[in-house]
Amino acid sequence: MPDIALQRPGLSRERRDALLGLLLIAPTVLVLGAVIVYPLLSAIALSFQSVYTPTLEGHWVGLANYRELLGSGGFWAALLTTAIWTAGTLTLQVLIGVAMALLLHQNIIFRSLARSLVLFPYFLSTVVAVLVWRWLFNDLYGIVNHALMTAGVIDAPVNWLGAMPNAMLSIMVVGAWKFFPFVVIAVLARLQTIPEALYEAARIDGAGPISRFFDVTLPQLRDVLTIVILLRTVWDFKEFDLIYLMTGGGPVNGTRTLPLIVYQQAFGLNQMGMAAAYAVSMMLVMLVFMLAYLQRARKAAA
Amino acid sequence: MGDLMEPERPPVSSPISRRTALGVLAGTGVAAALSGCGGSDSRTTLRWWSPQAAPDQLKSYKARIAAFEAANPTIRVVFEPTSDEGYPAQFAAAFAAKQLPNIVTHLPSFAAQNYYAEGLLEPVDDVIKAIGATQFLDGTNDIYRTADNQHCALAIGNTAVDMLWYRKDLLQAAGIAAPPKTWDELRRACQAMQKPGLYGAALPYGMNAMTSLIFIGFIHRAGGQIFTPDLGVAIDSQPTYDALEFYRSMREFCPAGASNFSWGESLTAFVSGATATGIYGGRVLANVAAQNPAIADAISCTVYPTMSAAIPAWTFNDFPCLMIPKGAPHLAETKVFAAALYQPEFYIQQLHAAPGHVLPVLKSVPADPRYQANTLIARYPAEIDLMTRTAATGHNLGQETSAHRPNLKANEIIASNAIAELVQRVVLNNEAPKPAVAATAKRLAELMRA
């Protein structure tokens, strides 16, 4: 049918196929252009302007926003904080996620129920999760302090969210709790495809459980873990709501990551241009991870 | 207009204008006629935002909305809660997206001045006229007067935000005869009352608006100010250092979690009985009655102590107001609804929803038997009277004293957390006050220039 529809004198078959290809891909290009390219270009354009958020009125300032941003200690401190948060919570997510996936791969009772329940934190609204965790961490009424004091581990309530490094450790734990199910899903799916023959061969060679994990399971998980780590790095790097609601960036600037600064610049200080400069800078950092992901995906496909 | 729109209620005072009223009537009439053509709700929708949205307040708003909608079948009012901490972001996003609420209540006066200066608010002089300018307590609306001699907002209440709440029983048990009047007395009282399971105070040390707003009061109570009357940065002065020293010395009397306290946590700490003193507005009364009635007879409040008896008290009143964003549709209907919020029956109902917290700004209300009939207002007459008098002479960063020019950057200064950060650096990080204050002064100067 396309041949008939596009048949015109003077057009070769290859040319017609090329035109048809363009026609078919056009809607996708248009949609992607509208939802990705246009906002991206707008953000970059905004970053070269001084814009008052409520009215979106502003003027061109060139590289002034970037000069101010890179010259201030705030950006670099927040970048470091973001890196610490990302590395910390990601490590916990991977460790807990792999451990849980290994557990759920065993023949345990209520395995199906456990596999369903483990996804619960991932599906829970962040606002609800944060409210619950803030309550757990509360120094006056929280069960964490109460349990530790009852057990005699501590004498006085610990300030989990208002002192460093407790605040950073607390949000890392909550982040790990919230997002480890993603690791579980991916790793569990891969575990189910590892040929049993590999384990049998390892057993014949006298490998114990630990050796089997490091010599068989882990190498088989390498590809999926690489993708999971790259994706979660990008997502954790730009995590906003969990940190904002847990600590607001405090104490002082101890948990103030780059997304929190973007929010404050845009909507607290009404400086949308500067917020865009921060966001573009974040994007450039994340671009490194994205390129690594693309390279990895290309290699896997090959 | 009020009489045309709501025949069941007498007008508060002279109506807006006959022309406006007829316009609204015609508009709603056309809307009513058109409503027969479609199956969906074709009423004119007014969106109302407020951060004051406790359950009892919501109930009073619903009653007001229901009565208004019954009298104006072509208008629908939708209430949407915002928050004290989050409104600048919500406002900025709403303006940027041109998804404006029609009416906003209970935001501080400096927010109104800030938004009006940026051309984002409608003047509300005709709403004041509709209610009757003389109906308001003298001078109540002065803080909303603008450079072009209009009003950017009108008062919907007063709040004495930083009263010192204390437990009479605990003071007595500690052998203290009278509530503290100076910082030294307060510190001694907290020390005497503190014991395992009970802290002396509930001051905020979090990285948030509450810490900024509360600490500004401490600088004033040390005899200082954030800005000079002509808005030069004045924070780098001895009173600020004195305030920081005192605030740091109070940390040992506050719960460990105070370094993350905002309004809710600070209030709950006192109401639950975890602290012997608290710093808050009149909402304490309702919350104690509902959540911890066992201490209801033991609580009272006074103005927050100053560094020395020679320094006059300074009370933070956020001057909760009503404002109308420019560019929102249905302006005439919005103004009618705005005026309707002040009809005594419903206005008193709103005040009763947070007794002592939102204090009346209409002259007739304090002596109105309907207002006095509230259980909590009847139970705590001395506290309500003190808060009413104190709030009337209160100030905020938008106008630190009567001699100050309105500070149109106050909103951004609070949202920047610059002052909360100063508190955290000195108190939590134990940094030297001099460089921390100097950095804050520099930051404030940048914000004023921005």
Image: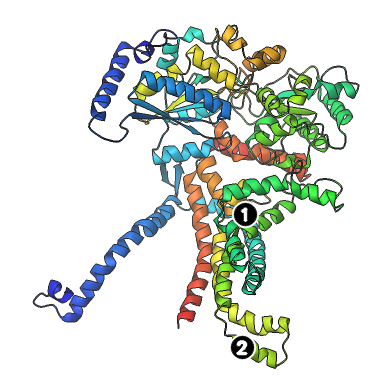
Residue at image coords 37%, 13% = B16
Closer to us: B421 or A230: A230
**Residue B49 percent location from the top left of the image:** 48, 31
- Quadrant showing the N terminus of chain A: bottom left
- Residue under mark 1: which chain is it in? A
SS label for mark 2: helix
Tag 2: residue type? Answer: Leu
SS label for mark 1: helix
Image disc number at residue A78: 1
Closer to us: B276 or B389: B276
How crowded pointer 1 is (Cα within 10 Å; few <14, some 14-19, many 20+) is rated as many
Instruction: Tell me which numbered mark, 2 or 1, is placed earlier along the sequence.
Output: 1
Q: In the orientation shown, which residue stands out farthest toward the left?
A: A9
**Residue B4 percent location from the top left of the image:** 34, 12
Tag 1: residue type? Answer: Ala
Q: Name the residue under label 2.
A: A198
